[in-house]
Image: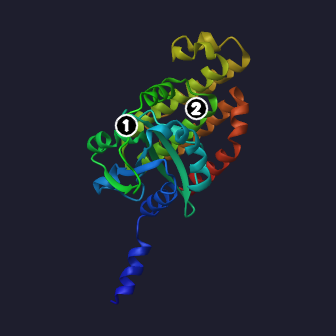
Amino acid sequence: MPRIAFDTLEHLNRPSQFAIMEKVTDVLATSPAVTHLLVRGSIARGTSDRLSDVDLVIGITPSAYADFVAVHDALAATELGAIVPGWLDTIVPRMGGLGYVHLIEHAGRLYQLDLYLAPADRLTSIAAFTSGSIVYTNPDAGIHLYDPANDDFINRHLSAAPTCEQLIVEALVLTWMIHKRLMRGQQFMAYAETHMLHTAARSLIRTALSPQTAFYGWYHLDTDLGKTPIGQACLRELDMLIASPPVPTVRSLTDSLERILALAHRAAPQAVDKLCLSIDAYRHHLALD
């Protein structure tokens, strides 16, 4: 078979994740604040499949770190095809930075892009911890000194209570993650993330209807929220949600998401309005899979 035929077959069967990595690299390499890109996770280990996330660590000049974090969400939307705002990842280990999960559109399909934003002075320890591989180094990158202001900045982000809008985004991202677990038969991970999904729904109604008791979690939920008709209606929705299978089916997972979105419409309509285009795009892609 001629070499050109092999090249054509190789191109047609190339995992989309590699094209996504190239696109992210091309976009971020234009920023003088970006010093390195490191790939981690299943792609770095050589165990990825066509459902795998693209896991990247972005090294950022310490003096530009806070500014880059502030604009990276807009960059993901305009340059990388993100359809929803990034979710501040509460699952990723704490490695000295901030992790965000983005759902991006590529070649008509939805993929998960995990970006861990870290000051450049922490890249060596992160690379060792994750066994990741450097895929890009800024040729102008020099030695970057530790900036203690970044520790305060990171800690404030990690300890801040999420808004209703952020909790809706969390529900969308978790649903996508659970869906992938079900496709792979990863029952235990599906169970763990389903519990997180239910907790996000609980936090949403707490934050919307009783923000002063949001830190109570599940404690006194009925007495705190059951004093008003809207609270009672939200509690009924939540009760039906947590009664769904602990390891969902694809159908019950879709039903759970719709129940959460109905709950959000009732408890936090303004947050839903802000995300209406993102939710529509998300529903479209979920239906495709």
Disc assigned to residue 167: 2
Q: Position of residue 29 (x, y in %)?
A: 48, 57
Q: Amino acid at mark 2?
A: Leu
Local secondary structure at mark 1: loop
Crowding at mark 2 (Cα within 10 Å: few <14, some 14-19, many 20+) = many
Q: CA distance from mark 1 to mark 2?
A: 35 Å
Q: Amino acid at mark 1?
A: Leu
Relative to 6, is 94 above or below? above
Is 25 or 243 nearer to us in this picture? Answer: 25
Crowding at mark 1 (Cα within 10 Å: few <14, some 14-19, many 20+) = few
Quadrant in the rendering for residue 47: bottom left
Q: Position of residue 123 (x, y in %)?
A: 34, 43
Q: Position of residue 217 (x, y in %)?
A: 51, 17
Disc assigned to residue 177: none
Q: Which residue is mark 1?
A: 145
Q: Position of residue 38 (x, y in %)?
A: 36, 51
Local secondary structure at mark 2: helix
* Residue at far bottom of view: 2
- Give the residue at x 72% y 14%: 228
